Image (tube, rainbow, N blue to C red):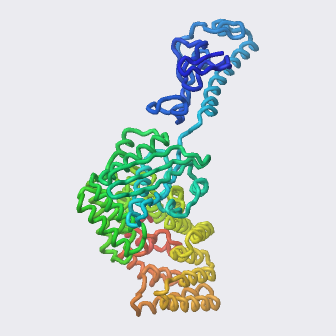
Amino acid sequence: MKRCPTCKKTYTDETLNFCLEDGAWLADGRQPDEPATAILSEPGAVATGFSEGESPIRPQVHTTDQTVLFPSGAEAEPQENLGGLSAHQAAKPQGKVGSRQRLLAVVGIAFLLLAGGFFGYRYFAPTKQIESIAVMPFVNDSGNADIEYLSDGMTETLIASLSQLPNLNVKARSSVFRYKGKGTDTRTIGKELNVQAVLTGKISQRGQELSLYVELVDVATDKIIWSETYDRQMASIVGLQKDIVRDVSQKLQTKLSSVDEARLAKNHTANAEAYKLYLQGRYYWNKRTPIENEKALKYYEDAIALDPTYALAYAALADSYLLQLPAMPRAERFPKARAAAIRALEIDDTLGEAHAALAEVEVSEWNWPAAERGFKRALELNPNYPTAHHWYAEYLSRFGRHDEAIREIRRAQELDPLSIPINLIAGHVLMMARRYDEAIAQFKQTLEMDENFLLARVFLAETYMNKGMYEEAINEAEKRVARLPGDREDRGRKQRENFAEMRAAYREAGARGFHEKRLEQQKRNQETATGVRPYLMAKLYVQLGDNDRAFEWLETVVEKREGDGYLNVDPAFDQVRGDPRFRELLRKAGFPY
């Protein structure tokens, strides 16, 4: 029997020379004068007996020249007998069979020692590093709906902070917030989001007192890994966020570099009131309506007024102009988004969100090289930012780099699996890659997530048209019109009449009749306030074989930056790609040709 001099644990296995708990040499084992140390690197420091401050590794497996198959340096003096022969004797030629047996014995011993250390760790260490987590919406336990922004905002900023951790997959806001108020159990969440752990929390405010209770749960066992209650004054709310991130990263056994630690420790503002205004802005921005976004803009501006160096508020301002103000003229909103993003980067050049926002502005102006540099920098700074992967996928798709685009959008889906916009663009990327059946399946999956997401029906109908399935395209377009809000009923009635005309024309004259009817309807729009879209007019003339008229409209498309920059890859223009005029248009638009 052997006994560990450090932890006092006893072992009956006489072949063990080290303790499986702390790696110390056992009292009866022979400790060589100069042991080498083999480390099989894997997290689990606490479980294996090391202090939390040490690097998380498996139990150390000590080896000597006798236990290493190919020792380096001079031959060691004999220390043990192998099968009655000294190590020195065993090294001498003893015949072919004997040499082979001794070699096999040495290999076997080396293997057993290494395997013992490995399996000892695997079976005696009860924990391992968590690599994926979902931060669920914190519950507002105050009974006051006016501070809902606080519970939602702290959840979102915690997600953003944890996303900075290396080798940790953190599910994005739009995925976890779909569970808000539903009481879904942690095992179901873990399965649906494919995560190992779930962080939940309850927040309450009484006057200037803030209390937050958090739990980290292992979804496989449904056991609490760690829990903590934080009691703070509202004036200390900025530091609270940093404390939570630090504690969670420690419990996840995430090993941080000095750069990672500095990034997590950074406070974007020291002004508690500015931080609260920022959280209120995010709360309204996430409602995704023009009216709510107007409120968000005001909160961001107020936060910036209190702290003019609040880079994160400027980045959020840029996002609002980019994504949430479709009613604002293009010539107004993109310059405002650019100004906000640039100001954010002037204050803090390490904000991945600001680099991504500025890159998207460059896309809107077809400044392609600057856009790609911005997206790459954003992902370098924050590789877990799903929006940057999403926007970069669209950029790559525009250039026909389809395999890269699909990889990027799949990564965005992995980070934010329940995001409607990301799932929509996944289908669009597949459509532009001419992978029509996969695109159709993806659009249908998106509609299963939200059947009222009308843009998915628009793209699904377009995919059917690209595949020559005109009846299906018309049917899908009609479903979109049927779901228009009541205040748009008159517009819906006119569109239904248009679809009926398209169906009749298609059944009478096939694809040509279908496109002729669409062109006729677009010309009617020219006489109304609706107007015509140059990009669509160019596509219709190409389909009808009138290339001269098509190129007249395409000149307008390039001049006005129409069509979201998809001219280079849109299947509708495949028939004219060999025309020198088209290659010249691509050159003007900045695409390779």
- Give the position of the C terminus as an image quadrant: bottom left
Instruction: Pick the residue in front: 545 or 318.
Output: 318
Looking at the picture, how far across and down is residue 83, in whole percent?
72, 10
What residue is drawn where x is 56% and y is 27%?
59
Vertical position of residue 293 compared to residue 68: above or below: below
* Relative to 354, residue 197 above or below: above
Quadrant holding the N terminus: top right
**Residue 67 visible (yes or no):** yes
Residue 444, position in %: x, y? 60, 71
Residue at image location 33% in from the left, 58% down from the top: 207
Q: Nearer the viewer, residue 21 or 544?
A: 21
Question: Within the image, what quadrant is residue 451 found in?
Answer: bottom right
Residue 343 lies in quadrant: bottom left
Q: In the depicted view, which residue is nearer to us: 469 or 59?
A: 59
Q: Can residue 368 be seen by looking at this rendering?
A: no
Q: Position of residue 537 (x, y in %)?
A: 46, 83
Q: Position of residue 129 (x, y in %)?
A: 53, 40
- Residue 122 location, quadrant: top right
Between 565 and 65, the one nearer to me in the picture: 65
Q: Is residue 41 left or right of residue 92?
A: left
Instruction: Answer above or below: position of 514 versus 94.
Output: below
Q: Is residue 589 above or below residue 239?
A: below
Label tally = 0
Residue at coordinates 42% horizontally, 81% vertically from top-left?
Answer: 534
Q: Report the residue that reaches farthest toward the front.
A: 206
